[in-house]
Structures are given as structure tokens and as C-alpha cells.
């Protein structure tokens, strides 16, 4: 009887036929590889994000006045709220990271080539949707980082010529970052982008079914538009296996490990923030983006200013254009990474560049350390046995916030050079000039220091020669004693 | 006869008479046209709603009192805050906007926006070195708001100000950006 009911349901709902034509579709046995697990890993992360995100939306209040309080409520009052917030945060980190690996893999394996151009392009759009989720999600964690992150976004949009002000207003949904801004980003994060992602993932997977998963590339096996379809068909005939149950095992193992990784990180590290009420009058803040955007943070600090606006406006278009054009530029030919040195080099350079920029972003040497002048004492070895004038100079160096940008003995800002060996590097005249006129990215202190203070601070800096190296000498005046 | 076969035959039979073709295609055209018109009527208000800022935009500028002039000592730079004049009841603390007020001498003031001209982070005033420093990408500005070092493309945004009835007023209301400074 139960069997009869089950058969009836299956017949009317097409369950087993649907399953056989999707999960049971035939794939080349070679693609049941450890390299082919990252797509399903990304999808798993997305499913976790939907579940945890929905649960968080049960409690979260998308109102500028209430959001922060509701986040604190979620974290400290709501039973297991802290854990779901942590899983959502770590799920997003894992999703972006695994997606990047997935993208590198399909690039290196030539999976974007004929006839899978649209699979690649839908994947590129999914990448940008995911980054969009990452940014809007950071905004929904409505704290000081979110507030000033929006300010950075608005300032970038404000550089668009002509319609910049309109775009800023469209982005903020008002004249300032406030209530309607949060509503707007909530809508993007919860309705618009997830809807797009679901539609695009459906397309992406449907293309994997209709165009077939990429076979494991063999060096010397050339993609040719005339013969490829026949060759792929023959490969499936010869060594095709149903994805379920023959080729799914490694995906299952990887997905299981990813899920355990997310749950483990969430349990161990806990949720991120919220850090600080989003009240712009609390200006003692050091805004930093989440890790997916640390590279952008670094780029914006390091770009020469003359090309900054140009690159902010054109680089995204160029990057999207190149990614879209890739399967049309290089749609045939070798697939194997062993025969595509330029592709391998590209991946290495891109990963190194992003890795370096993210690493720099974690400690941002270009930012002054706002409290270094009052928090980091002058190292003892630099004040021992110094004359009163030199000691006065040490005080000036401390009180005039020089340490915010210059380090002594490893503590202090890194915006300017460390001052440890400066007495050996610059002559007294050069030091005076540098302090008074600034230059090379240093503000001029001429108006803010009395002559006596300049004399004292220069006298102190001339003593900064850790190994008792000689004073710097003025080569234009050989033989003269150093001024 | 099965249902499907009948319709197929009827369709084939109908297709062979010219009057049926024109009637079918006429109905299709009417249907399509109706949907295009209705779709446009639907799209216009939706697009107008979402992109209203492109159609017409309030300048969002108004005079704001920052307090009595005596609150700002001579030759000093102080943080002042105001409630943004264009606000919603659910804005919470986000509508509290800070700014830097520098009283140069007598009734001469300079009032700077908090936002760095590089990417909008909050600049902080350092009384001792007479500099504004930005915590994000390392911009620095002199006491008078001019660019001192780092990536900012210009000096600090400066509010218009006036003194009326012993009060300092500034003209503001929107986030300053490079394309629309204060």
C-alpha cells in the first residue's frame, strides 16, 4: 500500500525521472576529480547562507535606529543568536574563498572554452553578485565600519563625472547615510541579489547539464568547434558514469569538510562585531572593511593620486570586460594548464597580488596610528645620557604627534620612515628643512613649531644612531664639521 | 480520438484558411500591444520611484545653528555636532553629524566637514601638531583645511557660515562628495 502511494507520487511528480536526468546525468569518469569539488562547495556555502540569513532576519530590525540594538540582542540575548551570526559570517568568508578557488580551477582547466562560454559568463556574474552580497552584508552589520564603509562607497561614486551626485543620492537613498540607506541595502542583500543568485545558479547548473561538465584536460587535446561535440559524446559513451552515485563522492567529502570548517570556525572564533554604535559623532574610530574588500582598501591607499579617480572609474569596467571576453578571445585550443603557461602565470600573479594587498590591508602601514604619540613611550635607550636640549627634542617629537607616522624601536606609525637611524641618514640641515617644509608625503611643520622646538627636535634626531654610527655628512661641504 | 491529435488537426485545418491566420495573428498582435502598453504604464512609475533622484533632487541645503559663538574659543578648533535638518524619525544616531569649527579670530571662522576628501572617513584634529589626520588611507590636512599630505585630492570641505544673534550658523544637510561639495 505504502509502495503504491509512493509510486503514485513519483509518477505524478516526476521525482525519480527528474533525479535521474539531473543528479544521475552522465559525466566523464575523469571529472570525478578532487579538482572538481569547488563548485559544489560554493553552492553548499550559499545554501548555508540562505538558512542562517533567513533565521537572522527573524530577529534583525532593518532600521537605522534599531539595527545595532537588534544585533546586540541577537548576539547576547537571543538563544544561539551569536552562533547563527557566526555561521553566517564564516559562511560568507568560506563562500568568497572557495569561489575564488573554483574560478581559478575552471580557468586553469580551460572549462570556459567552447561550448561552455555562457557557463563561464554566468559564473562571472555570480562572482560579482557574491561580492555584492559581501558588501551589502557588511552594511547590514550596522556598526561604525558599516557606516564609514558606506561613506567610502559614496565618495567613490561621487567621483563619477556628471552624474556623480545623482548616483550618490541613489546609493544612499537620501542626502546622508541614514535610515533609508539601510533599508536600501537590506533590500539588496535580502531580496534582489539573492534572487539574482538563485536564478543564475539555476542557469549555471542547467548549462553544466546541457553542455556537460568539462572533461579532465589532457595536454595536446585541442578544442575544435567542428569536432568537440562529437568527441565529448564519444567520451561519454566510452567512459561516462552517472554523476550520482559514481562521481559524487569527492564533492560530498569536500562539502562535508567545508561545512565542518564553517561550523568549527563559527564556534571557535564567534561572530564579527558589531563594533561600535553607527553614530558619526563618535569620531575615534578606525574604519576597516571585511577581508573580501581589504585588497580594495589597500589599492585605494597605495595608488598614486593622479591615476586614482581614473582607475576607480575604469578598472571595474575593464576587469568585467576582460572576464566576459575571455571565452571569446581564447575559446578553442589547448585546455590543459601544462600547455598554457600564460594562464598559469596569470593565476599566480593575480593570487599573489590579491594576497599581498589583503595582507597589507590587515595592518595598513599607510595609516597614521592615531594614539601612538600618547600611547607609545620613547624607548629608554634613546633618552639615556642625552643633553637637556636633546631630551626637550624627544618631548617635542612625542608631543607633536611625530610618532603617529614615524616609529622608534618598532613602535609607532609606519606612514613615514622609521626614525631609528635618521641621524646617520640626514644631516642637521636636511632635518631642519624636512621638519619645516615637509615634502615627500610629510606635512610641513614650519607654522606649528617654534624655532627653539625645531632646534631641539633636530638635536634629538641627530642622536638617533643606534650603533653609534657617524653623523650624516654634507657632501657639498667636505671636511666641514657637520652642522 | 485523443485530445492532442484533435487540436493538431484543427490547427492544421485552421492554418490553411487565410482568414483564420489573419484572425489569429490579429488577436496575438492585440494581446502583445496591450501588454506592451500596460508594461510601460507599470514601468514608468517603478523607474520614476527608484530613480527619483535623477529626475529632480532637493539641494538638501539649509542653515543649521551650531551654538553660541562664545562656545568656540579664539584660535582653537573644536568638534561641533548638529542634527541633520533632513531626517526621518527612524534615522537614529546616524543623523547626528559632526564638523570641525575653527575660530580664527573674532568673527572669522572656518567650519570643516568631518569627511576626508579622499574617501569620506572621519578626520581627527590634533591640537598639538595642528593637523587633521585621517585614519583610513593616511591623508593629512593643515589647520586651515588645506591638503598637507597623502591621497586626498583637495583640502577639507568647508561649510558656508554666518553669525546671527550671537549664534554660529552653517549651511549644510548632505554628505559632501567631490562631485557635490558643501
Image (cartoon, coloured by chain):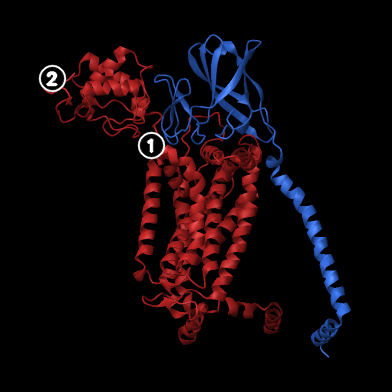
Q: Residue furthest top?
A: B106
Dot 1 or dot 2: first in sequence order is 1
Who is closer to the viewer here, B80 or A203? A203
Q: In this view, does A34 lie to the left or right of A20?
A: left
The image shows residue B1 at horizontal and vertical percentages of 83, 91
The image shows residue B63 at horizontal and vertical percentages of 66, 22
Q: The blue chain is which one?
A: B
The secondary element bearing badge 1 is classed as: loop
Which chain does the numbered disc 1 sit on?
A
Which chain does the numbered disc 2 sit on?
A
Look at the picture and state if A144 lies above or below B124: below
Look at the picture and state if B176 lies above or below A270: above
The image shows residue A178 at horizontal and vertical percentages of 63, 36
Question: Which of labels 1 and 2 is toward the front?
Answer: 2
Please tell me how crowded label 1 is: few (under 14), some (14-19), or many (20+) other residues with Cα within 10 Å: many
Please tell me how crowded label 2 is: few (under 14), some (14-19), or many (20+) other residues with Cα within 10 Å: few
Q: In which quarter of the image is the N terminus of chain A?
A: bottom right
Colour chain A is painted in: red
The residue singled out by tag 2 in the image is: A480
Q: In this view, does A252 lie to the left or right of B2?
A: left
Q: Are the residues flagged by discs 1 and 2 from a single subunit? A: yes
The image shows residue B2 at horizontal and vertical percentages of 81, 88
Q: Which residue corresponds to the image point at 39% horizontal and 47% vertical from the top-left?
A: A357
Is residue A193 visible from the viewing direction of this image? yes
The residue singled out by tag 1 in the image is: A366
- Label 1 and label 2: CA atoms lie apart by 38 Å
Is residue A61 visible from the viewing direction of this image? no
Amino acid at each position: 500500500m505504502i509502495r503504491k502511494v509512493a509510486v503514485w507520487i513519483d509518477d505524478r511528480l516526476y521525482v525519480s525521472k527528474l533525479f535521474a536526468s539531473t543528479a544521475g546525468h552522465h559525466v566523464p569518469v575523469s571529472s570525478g576529480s578532487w579538482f572538481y569539488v569547488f563548485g559544489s562547495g560554493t553552492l553548499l556555502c550559499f545554501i548555508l547562507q540562505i538558512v542562517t540569513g533567513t533565521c537572522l532576519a527573524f530577529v534583525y530590525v532593518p532600521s537605522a535606529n534599531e539595527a545595532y540594538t537588534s544585533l546586540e540582542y541577537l548576539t547576547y540575548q537571543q538563544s544561539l543568536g551569536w552562533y547563527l551570526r557566526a555561521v553566517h559570517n564564516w559562511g560568507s568568508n568560506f563562500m568568497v574563498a572557495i569561489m575564488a578557488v573554483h574560478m581559478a580551477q575552471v580557468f586553469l582547466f580551460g572549462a570556459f572554452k567552447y561550448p561552455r562560454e555562457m557557463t563561464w559568463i554566468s559564473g562571472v556574474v555570480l562572482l560579482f553578485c557574491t561580492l555584492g552580497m559581501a558588501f551589502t552584508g557588511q552594511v547590514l552589520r550596522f556598526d561604525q565600519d558599516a557606516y564609514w564603509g558606506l561613506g567610502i562607497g559614496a565618495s567613490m561614486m561621487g567621483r563619477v563625472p556628471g552624474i556623480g551626485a545623482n548616483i550618490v543620492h541613489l546609493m544612499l537613498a537620501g542626502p546622508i547615510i541614514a535610515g533609508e540607506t539601510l533599508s536600501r541595502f537590506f533590500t539588496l542583500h535580502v531580496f534582489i541579489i539573492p534572487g539574482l543568485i538563485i536564478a543564475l545558479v539555476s542557469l549555471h547548473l542547467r548549462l553544466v547539464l546541457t553542455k556537460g561538465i568539462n572533461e579532465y584536460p589532457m595536454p595536446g587535446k585541442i578544442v575544435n568547434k567542428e569536432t568537440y561535440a562529437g568527441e565529448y559524446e564519444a567520451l561519454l559513451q566510452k567512459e561516462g558514469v552517472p554523476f550520482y552515485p559514481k562521481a559524487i563522492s569527492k564533492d560530498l567529502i569536500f562539502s562535508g569538510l567545508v561545512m565542518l570548517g564553517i561550523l568549527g570556525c563559527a564556534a571557535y572564533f564567534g561572530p564579527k562585531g558589531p563594533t561600535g554604535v553607527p553614530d558619526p559623532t563618535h569620531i575615534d574610530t578606525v574604519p576597516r572593511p571585511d577581508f573580501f574588500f581589504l585588497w580594495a582598501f589597500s589599492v585605494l591607499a597605495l595608488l598614486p593620486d593622479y591615476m586614482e579617480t581614473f582607475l576607480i572609474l575604469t578598472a571595474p569596467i575593464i576587469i568585467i570586460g576582460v572576464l566576459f571576453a575571455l571565452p571569446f578571445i581564447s575559446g578553442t585550443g589547448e585546455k590543459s594548464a601544462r600547455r598554457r603557461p600564460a594562464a598559469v602565470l596569470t593565476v599566480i600573479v593575480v593570487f599573489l597580488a590579491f594576497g599581498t594587498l589583503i595582507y597589507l590591508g590587515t595592518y595598513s602601514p599607510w595609516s597614521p596610528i592615531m594614539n601612538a604619540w600618547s600611547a607609545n613611550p620613547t624607548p629608554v635607550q634613546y633618552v639615556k645620557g642625552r643633553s637637556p636640549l636633546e631630551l626637550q627634542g624627544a618631548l617635542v617629537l612625542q608631543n607633536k604627534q611625530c610618532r603617529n607616522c614615524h616609529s622608534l624601536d618598532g613602535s609607532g606609525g609606519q606612514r613615514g620612515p622609521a626614525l631609528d637611524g635618521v641621524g646617520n641618514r640626514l644631516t642637521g640641515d636636511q632635518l631642519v628643512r624636512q621638519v619645516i617644509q615637509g615634502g615627500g608625503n610629510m606635512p610641513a611643520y614650519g607654522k606649528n613649531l617654534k624655532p627653539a622646538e625645531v632646534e631641539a627636535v633636530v638635536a634629538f634626531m641627530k642622536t638617533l644612531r643606534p650603533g653609534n654610527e657617524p653623523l650624516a655628512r654634507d657632501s657639498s661641504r667636505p671636511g666641514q664639521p657637520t652642522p | 480520438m485523443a485530445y492532442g491529435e484533435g487540436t493538431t488537426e484543427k490547427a492544421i485545418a485552421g492554418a490553411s484558411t487565410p482568414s483564420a491566420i489573419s484572425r489569429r495573428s490579429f488577436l496575438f498582435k492585440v494581446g502583445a500591444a496591450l501588454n506592451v502598453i500596460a508594461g510601460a504604464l507599470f514601468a514608468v512609475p517603478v523607474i520614476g520611484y527608484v530613480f527619483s533622484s535623477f529626475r529632480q533632487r532637493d539641494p538638501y541645503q539649509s542653515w543649521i545653528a551650531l551654538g553660541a559663538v562664545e562656545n568656540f574659543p579664539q584660535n582653537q578648533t573644536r568638534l561641533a555636532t548638529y542634527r541633520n535638518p533632513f531626517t526621518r524619525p527612524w534615522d537614529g544616531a546616524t543623523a547626528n553629524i559632526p564638523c570641525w569649527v575653527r575660530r580664527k579670530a573674532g568673527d572669522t571662522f572656518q567650519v570643516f566637514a568631518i569627511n576626508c576628501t579622499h574617501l569620506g572617513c572621519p578626520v581627527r584634529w590634533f591640537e598639538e601638531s595642528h593637523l587633521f589626520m585621517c585614519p583610513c588611507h593616511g591623508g593629512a590636512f593643515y589647520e586651515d583645511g588645506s591638503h598637507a599630505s597623502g591621497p586626498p585630492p583637495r583640502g577639507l570641505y568647508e561649510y558656508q557660515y554666518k553669525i546671527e544673534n550671537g549664534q554660529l550658523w552653517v549651511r549644510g544637510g548632505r554628505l559632501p562628495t567631490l562631485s557635490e561639495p558643501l
